[in-house]
Amino acid sequence: MPLSYYACANCGFWQRHFAPPDCPVCSDTRNDLPEDGWHFLPETQVAATHDGDFRQVADDLWAFTTTPNLGLAGTGWLIVRPEGNIAFEAAPYHSARMLTKIAELGGIRFLAASHAHGYGALFQLQREFGPEMLAIHKDDLAMTKAFRVTTPYDDVLEIAPGYVLHHVGGHYEGQAALHDRPGRRLFCGDMFKINQDEAGRSHAISSHKAYHKDIPLTHNEVRHYRDVIAPLAFDAVLTPFEYAPEVDRDVAVAALDEALTRLPGVKRLPLGERA
Ligand SMILES: [Zn+2]
Ligand SMILES: [Zn+2]
């Protein structure tokens, strides 16, 4: 069997392999195993059965998603700027139409992701656009075999003036957030889960080690999130799954403060209710 790209049908994680023996994301405690055994979809099959959508979220920000859903159904964010576009996270797969749109918007100069649940088809973006940087925190390198990390980093990495990756750990050892200072946004990975209604309005916020199993973070993990984000100015958070303009810096910090007032435990804190 020749080397090729395969997506896990359960979570969408891509591996370059000849016959993946298992999926490291699903085998991990932070995701569920498939009920009916492993199914790995070759790239040709995914390409033949999936398309995607894109939408403009703000003047300089686009969101890319895959249809029908593949795996965890994340979102790829593209920050458009004259000095070179920044892509953070990736859609689970990009159709030719999506790649053409990214090219029309100026391609990708800098590429990064929060952690394995946000990787999507990063390999495809690197293959298509050859960005000068693909930055992943050093503690998550074991998950990056489908693409080539050009720029591993420690605690902080300013990928372009005003755009700073911060290691936050917690949910994943190497989890990182991207602070977009010019746009006053925090691309926060799965530091936060934002519950939203069908219209996309946010109504609750929580943090987890493992979302499916409701395993909470430890106090030190929550404290570390707080230490990193409290000094940052932002008016919205963006996870791989949600855009939440209702969650600014004060709301996010208050949610972490609330978690530190009680025993570790997952609580979906209604927005508007402060500790
Ligand atoms: Zn999987
Ligand atoms: Zn995650």
Image (cartoon, grey):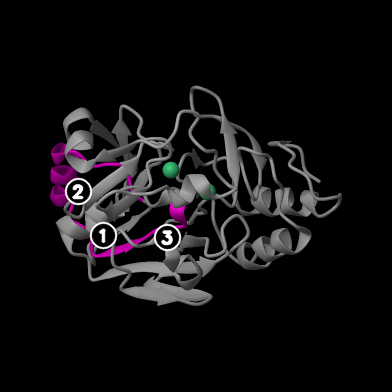
- What's under tag 2, amino acid-wise? Ile
State the extent of the magenta-drawn residues as a range: 90-116
Q: Which mark is residue 249?
A: none
Q: Is residue 112 magenta?
A: yes
Callouts 3 and 2 close, C-beta under 8 Å: no
Q: Position of residue 26 (x, y in %)?
A: 49, 44
Of badges 3 and 2, nearer the viewer stands: 3
In the picture of the structure, the residue carrying the numbered disc 1 is 85
In the picture of the structure, the residue carrying the numbered disc 3 is 143
Determine the secondary structure under disc 2: helix
In the picture of the structure, the residue carrying the numbered disc 2 is 102
Callouts 2 and 1 close, C-beta under 8 Å: yes
Most extreme residue toward the right is 262
Query: Upstream in the sequence, badge 3 or badge 2?
Result: 2
**232 up-or-down from 7: above or below:** below
- What's under tag 3, amino acid-wise? Met
